[in-house]
Amino acid sequence: MRIVLHLAEQTVREAMRRRFLNVILLFSIVMIGASSMFSQWAPGAELKMMLDTGLGFIRFFGMLMAVFIGAMLIPTEVETKTAYVLLSKPVTRWHFLLGKFLGAFATVGINVLIMGGVFVLVMFLKRGTFEAVPNLYSNLAYAVVLLACEMLVLLSITVMVSTIASWIFTSVFAFFVYFAGHVSASLKHLATPEYYESPLARGMIKVLYVVLPHFEDFDVREPIIVGDPLEWSIVSGTIGLGLLYAGIMITLGWLFFSEREV
Amino acid sequence: MASAIKTEGLTKYYGSLLRKPVVGVEDLTLDVKMGQVYGLVGPNGSGKTTTLKLLLGLIFPTRGTMTLLGRDVRDPASRQRVGFLPDGPYFYDHLNADELLSFYGGLFGLSGAELRKRSDELLEMVGMAGPERRRRIREYSKGMIQRVGVAQALINDPDVVLLDEPTAGLDPIGAMQIREIMFRLRDRGKTVFLCSHLLGEIERICDNVTILNEGCTVRQGAVQDLVEPGEGYMVEGREVDNEGEQAIRELADSIETGDGLLQAVASDQDKAVAIAQQISENGGEVVSLSRRRRTLEDIFIETIRGGRE
Amino acid sequence: MRTHRIIGVLIVITGLVGASSLHERIRFQRMVRQYDPPAPIEKIMQFSPTAVTGVIAGAILGGFRGPAANLLWLKMESYWHSDRWHDCLPVMRTVTWLDPHFVEAWRILGWHVMYNMTVETTDIDRQDMYLEAGVAYLKEGIAWNPHIYDLYWELGWSYFDKMDDFENAAKWLRAATEFEHPEYIERLIAHAYEKLPDIDKALDWYDYCLKRYPRDGTAIGATLTIRERYLASWRLLEQGDFHGAEAAVKHHLAMEPDDHIGRRLLATIYERMGDMQNALDQWDLLRATYALDSGAGRKVRQLKAELGIEETVRERQERLKKEQLQRLYERHLELHGAERGLGAPHGGH
């Protein structure tokens, strides 16, 4: 565990010194800060507009960070041969993968929390411009945590694929999975005789439904807008789901990486 | 004496089902004893780096066995007392030398004052103790990276050090410093496993050597046994005129001239003396007269050109 | 190592199955709490193609339904300001599918269909179709947003103002009072009962208004007016004295012949008496003299059908026109599938 945490710390430091990441974070903070301006376009729905814009930006920029950091994590080490020296130490493939992944998630998580903090601050400062709803700030806090969890899942998939593919392929694949994961609910409807008569086709769709992540589980806009308090049972269950899925992906990544020649 | 590195029938083929396999290394059997300085030499593509990567678990053998300090190389604990410097090393360029050593030292459980002391000593040893230690590695020259690389290979005070072309990119003084380090390691009882194509260096440093060609072992043994005294004498002279040169040709078995230096090989001592007298009488300067000796380079070229043993 | 790999594979497979099971439980909880709008595939054939550009489609697929709905809403507003009323409809509908908790979208959709689209046509049956559609949309919106007063109010007001269906108006307006709401809603409930007419309930609600706001001038005035004009007749009607009730209200109408609430009361008395012809005459008079009372027109048609009375020439022309439109509509369905403009509203109460 010591080695894993050591590698994670080094990964965070490396990521924080990367210019492109800092530029993305800065740009996202500016856009989130400006989200209150969009509310003027929809009188009567100011809160909804601000939420959609602010949370949307956090999700979008978080996704960019997760994909690009995750896609480059392992391939860069292998291509530049820094992995040679690292794996020549008493560092197993599992230590290496888990340490790098935890470091990457810490980086993405910190950035999502920063963006979330900025957004909550903006909402607080602009609280006079929209009609208040109950439980707004507590729900927002949960929403940000669940967004970070969503990025954890996306990052784990990206890292898993990066153990066997180049960073370009991994990035494209990760974006595809991200979109597919947001419409995975539709797959359940497709796996019915109404759409496909062939049992084989329906079976394949069901398998895809099981394997794909369900990113819509992490979206809690609706209760925030309505003002319903987010129940801890749902939040904790969703976080648990995210952790479980990420664990599965990293295990799969280890299975691939343990066989890979460096 | 215990073995530091041992391989038995080590073989690695590269390739896939669709392509004919390429031999990386084939049936390599080594036994490097503790405290030895062992050289692995061969032309480019002979399997030196493949062997190192197999020993460190970076790639996997097709067949054969390997142990490092008595442990199977698949056991990460086998690398606890091992240091490695790859050929053309690349390190995290956002770190400086201090941070790099701190990072690698941390992987071995080193920390705090002990780690700092160790880092200071190593940077001093490789000549990187000045202000450059706080500059980022991306600003270093190739030689500086090589020095830092040697330092990180020794951060855990290893019992076995694997070095791949350790003097590459270094100026003569830097190369000399690295050689001194290797001698110091040997004097401290460490085992050094050295891959290099600089045969003069290998001959000077190593106790034993294995010569590889196209993945196969062609010669193996103690350096002093391989580099035995040769037959005949060598006479070297300068400023020998044409007349003198003609006369020497009749006496010598073979003669080479170049850059004002004449080298004549004589089969016996009398002829060697006669050649030296000829040089002197013709107004030239006798540079040396010595027993002829085969170098490792001679053996290497002979072996590679002549095929396998 | 092989053992570790086998264990790893088993962990992955078991984990995926476990994760899927956990997801289904979370999905059920979310469905019960209405956290998720309908899945895109359910509505994919009914999204407005003119509105759903590639960018918005990407936003929808990328999990940015909210921003996609907002962008579409802006597009709708651009149609609105260009007087493209019909183009607004499919866009509004798409917005409600993308973001069912966008209350404003439901409210304006319902209002637009019931108010603006009905005046675009003179065909009574087509107008009725729009009104039914508007009611269905508002009910669907209430199903997605059951805990705020807004859409209950909108539906209740539509029944009251547009359809003169005071019974339903009162029902939905009363539902709105279950949540935090403006105080004028109670007054409107009372007014709805007054127009129904149900004088007892009207007085109860005005009484309730006065208890909350003792200085409510409208409630005070309405209470006095009702007691003076209709209470006596109502009491007699409730006691079953139809002729007495008729005489009482006729006495008032002799002095105030334009009082449409009084005339409604008289029509109600005749209906309860079983005198449908007289009831029809009263409703017909209301329809002719009070153009805003669309409920009267419906009552006339209903009673004529009950009485089997021959339609007037105008009514015959309207019927023929309706049949022709129906044939055109069926032909359109054959060629183009389900009507895209209004979609197929479903759900709600």
Image: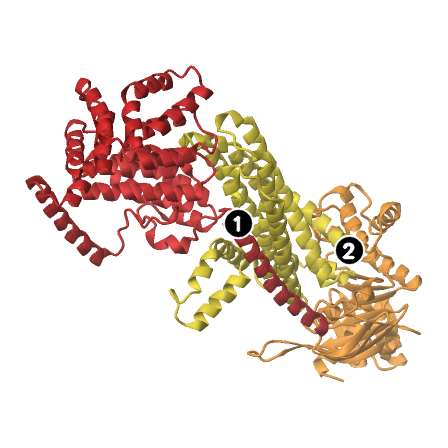
Q: Is residue B66 left or right of residue C321?
A: right
* SS under mark 2: loop
Label disc, if present, on residue B194 of the rendered structure:
none
* Few, some or many residues within 10 Å of mark 2 (<14, 14–19, 20+): few
Residue C308 at what x, y percent from top left?
13, 46
Same chain shared by disc 1 and disc 2:
no
Measure how far apart labels 1 and 2 are at the Cα level: 37 Å
Mark 1 against mark 2, which lies toward the viewer?
1
**x and y, in percent, of residue C289 in the image:** 16, 27
Tell me where residue A116 sits by quadrant: top right
Closer to us: C66 or C121? C121
Residue C249 point in image, percent of width and height: 23, 24
**Residue sitting nearer the eye, A143 or A161:** A143
Q: Residue at x 61, y 62 (%)?
A: C18
**Chain of the residue displaying label 2:** A
Instruction: Tell me the shade of chain C.
Output: red
The numbered mark 1 sits on a residue in which chain?
C
Q: Colour of chain B?
A: orange
* Above or below: residue B6 compared with residue A11: below
Who's yellow, chain-wise? A
Q: Amino acid at mark 1?
A: Arg
Q: Quadrant of residue B242?
A: bottom right
Q: Quadrant of the C terminus of chain A?
A: bottom right
Residue C30 image label = 1
Q: Residue at x 47, y 56 (%)?
A: A185
According to the picture, the residue beneath numbered tag 2 turns out to be A1
Q: Is residue B218 visible?
A: yes
Question: Relative to the observer, which residue lies in front, C7 or B261?
Answer: C7
Residue C312 image offset from top left, x and y in percent: 8, 40
